[in-house]
Image: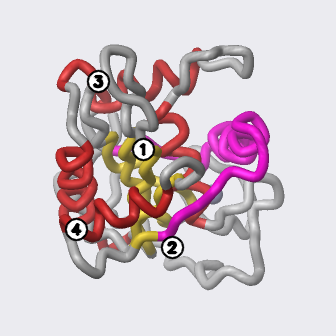
Amino acid sequence: MIAIAREDLIRVVIGVDPAVTSGEDADETGIVAVGLGPHQDQTCRIERCAGHAYVLEDATIPRELRPTVDQWAVRVVEAFDLWQADRVIAEGNQGGELVEQVLRTVRPGLPVKRVTARVGKRTRAEPIAALYEQGRVHHIGNPLGFSVMEDQLTTWTQSDRESPDRLDALVWAISALGISGSTGVLPQMDFVSLPKRNDFDLGGLTKL
Ligand SMILES: [Zn+2]
């Protein structure tokens, strides 16, 4: 079992993949909280490992609830506060400025970084998949909270038309942590000297 406390996380980001459609078949706005934290011997064999990603919450409002833009913006800010996040990473290919505006209407001064896709989903997702294979991504907390996201992670293929919004939000968030998927060490990052701690304070969070 892997557990982590907030103070063990070097930074936390909220990944947001905003819905660009509305109505009956609307996309979901994927909202996922991820933190950068220490290496775990239990799952990872990489020497001088640069850190692991801890997926803290899938805060996506289910599509059945038909959230308005304001509602998901409020949800993002709630997640930001709950996890004492450092930054919101918002996908901004379509209507990016609007996304930023809406978030800052709910919380003026919210640190939002807009990211845009220059490469396809598969290319973006590959380094993240590599991190999973290396045992460097941990879903923390109640597994029921991740069931929909995990379905999207395990069933999506490049040919699917259905857009996996939670997967996108997750990929943006983990990418923003700056962990390398292949070598394990990114020398320019400021988290290479991670504290090695074995005495995790559970802080109410557990991985099952
Ligand atoms: Zn590791």
Residue drawn at the location 55% of the way across and 17% of the way down: 162
Mark nearer the viewer, 3 or 2: 3
| Residue 161 in picture, x, y percent from top left | 62, 16
Let me know if residue 16 is in the magenta part. no
Q: Which quadrant of the structure image shows residue 31?
A: top left
Which residue is labeled 4 in the image? 105
In this picture, residue 177 sits left or right of residue 143: right
Instruction: Tell me the CA gap for discs 3 and 2.
Output: 40 Å
Instruction: Tell me the CA gap for discs 1 and 4.
Output: 16 Å
Q: Earlier in the sequence, mark 3 or mark 2?
A: 3
Task: Inspect the image, locate mark 4, and give the three-letter code of the amino acid beneath it.
Answer: Thr
Residue segment shown in magenta: 113-140
Q: Quadrant of the N terminus?
A: top left
In this picture, residue 13 sits left or right of residue 161: left
Instruction: Tell me the CA gap for discs 4 and 2.
Output: 40 Å
Task: Inspect the image, locate mark 2, and give the three-letter code of the amino acid beneath it.
Answer: Lys
Which residue is labeled 2 in the image? 196
Q: Earlier in the sequence, mark 3 or mark 1?
A: 1
Instruction: Tell me the CA gap for discs 4 and 3.
Output: 23 Å
Q: Quadrant of the C terminus?
A: top left
Q: Indicate which disc residue 111 carries.
A: none
